[in-house]
Image (cartoon, rainbow, N blue to C red):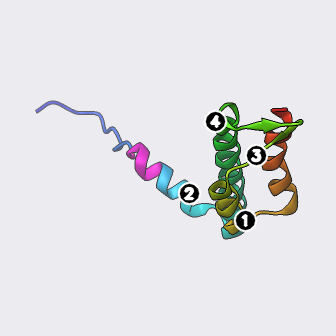
Amino acid sequence: MRNKGFHPHETHKDVKRSRYLQSIDRETTLHFASVARTELFKAEARSLLPQLPKEEGFTFIPNAFLERLLKEDLSVAQFNSVLAIFRQGR
């Protein structure tokens, strides 16, 4: 009989990822989720910007976008950073 070397079973990468995510505390998770939502809103604002009407240096922001933005639980700084995208498009 041949002597086979023992190779420990490699943990699947999804299991490693899941264990890592479970090790993160709740406060950090909520912070990362908030930052991710803010970045998604910024990306949407950048995509809307070329299509929006502009008049006398002001950009008209769609009501649907503003309603969704106001429903989110964002800090004042995050809210202002999303709206700053529309100021840059002047």
| 15 falls in the magenta region | yes
Residue 77 picture quarter: bottom right
Which residue is under mark 2?
21
Residue type of the residue flagged with mark 4: Ser
Which residue is under mark 1?
70
Residue type of the residue flagged with mark 2: Leu
Magenta highlight: main SS: helix
Task: Provide the secondary structure element on which disc 4 rests.
Answer: helix
Looking at the figure, which quarter contains the N terminus?
A: top left
User: Which one is in front in this view, the residue at disc 4 or the one at disc 3?
Assistant: 3
58 relative to 51 in the view: left or right: right
The answer to whether the residue labelled 1 contacts the one labelled 2, judged by CB atoms less than 8 Å apart, is no
- Residues at marks 2 and 3, CA–CA distance in whole angstroms: 40 Å
Residue 41 vertical placement versus 57 (above, below) = below
Q: Position of residue 89 (x, y in %)?
A: 81, 32
**Of 57 and 21, the residue lying toward us:** 57
